[in-house]
Amino acid sequence: MKFFDEARIEVIAGKGGDGAATFRREKYVPRGGPSGGDGGHGGSVIAIADRNINTLIDYRYTRIFRAQAGENGGSRDCYGRGGEDILLRLPVGTVISDSDTGEQLADLDEDGKQALLAAGGRGGLGNIHFKSSINRAPRQRTLGREGERRNLHLELKVLADVGLAGLPNAGKSTFIRAVSAARPKVADYPFTTLAPNLGVVRTAEHRSFVIADIPGLIEGAAEGAGLGHQFLRHLQRTHLLLHLVDLAPFDPEADPVRDARTIIEELRKYDEALYAKPRWLVLNKLDLIPLDERAARVQAFLDAFGPVERHFEVSAINGEGCEKLIFAIQDFLDTQNAHTGRNETADDGEEIEEIEDINESSNIAQ
């Protein structure tokens, strides 16, 4: 199954049934009278967040979802049956917007959260409602209303606490393999990561956080170079960004300072809010630098790059420096949660099972 994080669909709510204009003609009811019932309400289209669904693939090929119409009213005061609602099960983290107006309709950021996408039409009134002392045999009735019809844009933003950003081959996939049970593809060529990967990082028995790895950015991503900004949406819900920098590139003409600034500029072009998130610098691949040259190489980079919020020196391939970093991340997230009054402790077993399902679907190339 391929990983799809975007889809466009059309939802059509059911039309309300028409009211009836009928009269009683029974043997033992000599005066009879109006007996037309109301039409049933049309079915609605409702979205619900389901943690067991990980991609929008079901909505990539089926584009139109139509709810059932309400039945017309009948004679003998019989009301029409209401149309059945359609329930669209979407991954947790899906943002739903109106394609025509751009208005955001719902953000399904919690399992079980529901949102009404298109309301069913109201049923028409039968002639029993128009009877009065001066109108004993009304022939009036009303027709059922059409249901709402909308073109929708579905956008999945994965739920993660920490996001990784960096150039291709900066070591993001190697890092997430080093600190979690996630096993994204790793190779010695660019763009080995073609879809987001999630990993659960455990720091204690009941302390953990989720980290997201996305395909690498390159200069000009805002104009569509490489994979462009296609997957940056998955970092928008994170509380912290880790900016990985290859401090020992194989290309002798590569400039780590220039490359690091390129990533920051691409984040700014995509979203000012994402650019403003707390961002820590992670200087990676120290194992490729001789031990007696590391301190000088790191200091030279920091002097040229400028002030940073925090920086860490790691070697993801052998885990050097990773433990210090992940405990610093956990402390930062605990502080963030304390300030917002949130308690995000979850059952590790259920969380890991869900993350593994996402990775299973995302690790297949598009």
Image (spheres, rainbow, N blue to C red):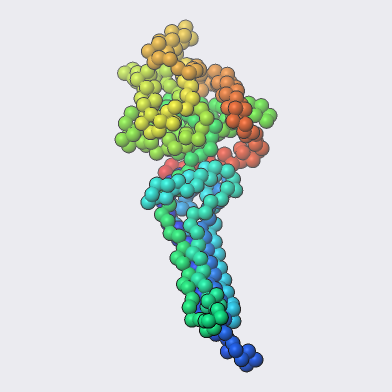
Residue in the foreground of this view, choosing between 181 and 256: 256
Tell me the residue at 38%/33% (across/down). Answer: 270
Quadrant location of the C terminus in the rendered image: top left
In the rendered view, would you say 207 is above or below 246?
below
**Where is 18 relative to 241, above or below?**
below
Q: State left or right for residue 210 relative to residue 96.
A: right
Tell me: residue 90, above or below residue 213.
below
Left/right placement of residue 203 relative to residue 171 reads right
Going by the picture, which residue comes out furthest to the right?
205
- Residue 36 visible to an observer of this rendering: no
Extreme residue toward the bottom, this view: 27
Q: Residue at x 51, y 69 (%)?
A: 123
The structure residue drawn at horizontal position 45% and vertical position 17%, both measured from the top left corner, is: 308
174 vs 44, nearest the viewer: 44
Q: Where is residue 321 in the image (x, y as percent from the top left)?
A: 54, 18
* Residue closest to the eye, 141 or 4: 141
Q: Which residue is drawn at 31% across and 35% down?
A: 223
Q: Where is residue 343 in the image (x, y as percent from the top left)?
A: 64, 33
